[in-house]
Amino acid sequence: MVLLLGVVIVAASCRRGPVLLATLLTIAAFDFFFVPPYHTFNIHDTAYFLTFAVMLAVALTMSRLTARIREQRQATADRERHTATLYALDHELTAAPDLPALIRVIATHLGRSAGGLATVITDEDLGHQDAPAWPADPLFDDPAVRVAGAWALSHQEPAGWGTRQCAEAPALLVPLGGETGLLALVVIRPEDPQQRIAGGALDLVRDQAQLAAGTWERQLMAEHSQRARAEVEAERLRTALLSSLSHDLRTPLASIEGAASSLLDDPGSLTSADHRELLESILEESRRMNRLVTNLLNMIRVETGELAVRKSWQPLEESLGVALLRMEEDLREHPVVTRLPPDLPLVPVDELLLEQVFLNLLENAVRHTPMGTSIEISAWRGEQSVVVEVADGGPGVPAGEEEAVFGRFYRVKGDAADAGAGSGLGLTICRGIITAHGGRIWVEPQPAGGLAVRFTLPLVGPAVGPVPLEPSVGKATHGGP
């Protein structure tokens, strides 16, 4: 039994040849040491031949079972490595942020599995599949490589080095294809073209190519779906903006038309005071239309991601002063209190866009607060930023809707103040402008009632590229009394 145990140990680590040799040596050792006459190979008792036959049969059976266990263990280990490699590839493919990163992951993993250097040629670079445009690479000067590539593209199977098709080619060509067609061709240059690739490695490369093609195709479909959703959302936004513009411009247009017709119909009967009042009405409603159009244009820039800022170091009170001057007529019934400390630092802002923020916040406060309600504007230095607050004593917003007020076309339900006026885009545009500056904006209910809108302007931040503003928008923003 001890001798048979040795056979089992040999079978656990060796193949059939060494196991057979160990079995014969075991029988010979048993005969030499334990069968009389001892220390010879002479056998006087023929019954020992049966013993030797039984030992041989048991040893071979045990070795065969042990070898099978070893092979199963090896196959299990290979499957585990195979699965772990595919899992690692899938994890990196999923984490790839864009197509170039995805291609780098595919080249790295397939080249590592095949034992060579991999290059990914996309379908756009290959051109027509039946007559591919091979890249300007010395490797493709070899006719065998071109033939292998053409076969791989037409049959959607690997060809070249290590395969049965075009095996003389010094490279392995693996197509990546999905349900939508060919995606790319992976060209793997082996480190040693004379050494054949193992069958398990070739199977792993096939499975990796299939996994990579599926992930690539899903990413393309996700990008197409995202673009389609963006186009639908942009179309919905344009429709909503046009609807809002046509609705919100009716009131100022009606006022302008009424005042202008009064001036034209019977100018002689109007006193100088009436004449001036009608002209002021035309001017005020024209400015109101200008703010509406500017807000709508800015809204389009915010939604399409084209809003950028042209920063320069400016005093905060300059943009605020221009906004207060432009809102002078609207603020006649709303006292404004400003609290800006004299040591307030300069802020890196786009003065035109910051002026638009103040205009929207002031107009919002005027529209939703009763006449005679004061508006307080404060600013102070925070941690690496300047904090600005525009507070009013109006009804505020319902609890739980502090974030909803920054949504497009938001209006407080049941708010009768200046009902129907405004496009509901003011705070949305403010958030887009402040975010483009690197700050944030939020609302805080006042303990004594009313609403405070706060925003931050970072004193240091990333450089922002300029955005070309339309001449009409620039003139409108600078317009004012």
Image: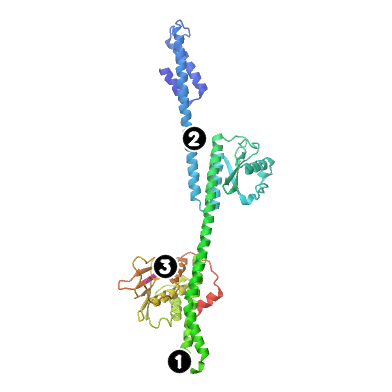
Residues packed near mark 1 inside 10 Å, few (<14), some (14 to 19) or many (20 plus): few
- Magenta highlight on residue 455: yes
Circles 2 and 1, Cβ within 8 Å, touching? The answer is no
Q: Which residue is mark 3?
A: 406
Residue type at mark 1 is Ala
Mark 2 or mark 3: which is in front?
3
CA separation in Å, label 3 and label 1: 41 Å
CA separation in Å, label 2 and label 1: 96 Å
Q: Which residue is mark 2?
A: 78
Image quarter hosting the N terminus? top left
Q: Earlier along the polypeptide chain: callout 3 or callout 1?
A: 1
CA separation in Å, label 2 and label 3: 57 Å
Q: Which residue is mark 1?
A: 273
Q: Secondary structure at mark 3?
A: helix
Q: Position of residue 467 (x, y in %)?
A: 54, 69
Q: Earlier along the polypeptide chain: callout 2 or callout 1?
A: 2
Residue type at mark 3 is Phe
Q: Position of residue 209 (x, y in %)?
A: 55, 43
Residue numbers of the magenta segment: 452-456
Q: Secondary structure at mark 2?
A: helix
